[in-house]
Image (tube, helix red, strand yellow):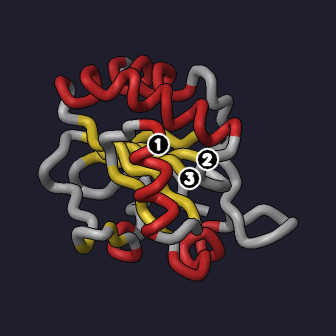
Amino acid sequence: MTQIGDIFPIEKLTTPKGSVSLDASAYTVLYFYPKDDTPGCTIEANQFQKLKPTYDKQNIRILGVSVDDADSHADFCEKFSLAFELVTDKDAALGTELGILRPSGPRHLRVTWVLDSAGKVVLYYPEVVPENHAQQILDDIAAL
């Protein structure tokens, strides 16, 4: 399990636009979630979207990650006007490596890592409450 102080295996993530790069942001939030367009995942995504202007002002990038495919992500983003990137963990390979797959099938647990611009984990949330998570991250980054 990747912990605070470790380098996150970011090279294993790609977006529809290509590989994920960290050097353009002060911090990157990698929030892993079970499935697009489900109640808890929608609450969490909408909280990030609501606070996105604050994230942008602080140069914090938001990346949501699930095993859903690019079409599912595109539909989810369109339905809820999400203006941040959703990444596909193809075949749940990264979720398996990180040990964050649900026992019931190839879906991620709800966990989050915050990385600095070098890819080092600075915050880790092994258990997430969707309703207040986006604000909690902002508060915790402010305390770094």
Q: CA distance from mark 3 to mark 2?
A: 14 Å
Residue 13 versus residue 99: which sits nearer the camera?
Answer: 13
Q: Residue at x 23, y 69 (%)?
A: 17
Q: Amino acid at mark 2?
A: Asp
Looking at the image, residue 139 sits to the left or right of residue 57; the answer is: right
Residue 63 marker: none
- In this view, the residue farthest toward the right is 104
In this view, the mark in front (2 or 1): 1
Name the image quarter holding the N terminus. bottom right
Question: Please, which residue is most extreme toward the left here?
Answer: 24
**SS at badge 2:** loop
Query: With 57 as the anchor, is 132 left or right in this view?
Result: right
Amino acid, disc 3: Phe
**In the figure, residue 95 lies in which quadrant?**
bottom right
- x and y, in percent, of residue 34 in the image: 67, 54
Q: Earlier in the sequence, mark 1 or mark 3?
A: 3
- Residue under label 1, please give it: 79
At label 2, counting other C-alpha atoms closer than 10 Å, the crowd grade (few under 14, some 14-19, many 20 or more) is some
Residue type for callout 1: Lys
In the image, what residue occupies the spot 78% across and 62% down?
Answer: 102
Q: Which residue is mark 2?
A: 37
Where is residue 2? Give x, y as percent.
Answer: 54, 60
Residue at 85% across, 66% down = 103
Dot 1 surroundings within 10 Å: few (below 14), some, or many (20 or more)? few
Disc nearer the start of the sequence (3/2): 3
Q: Are marks 2 and 1 in contact (CB under 8 Å)?
A: yes
Residue that label 3 marks:
32
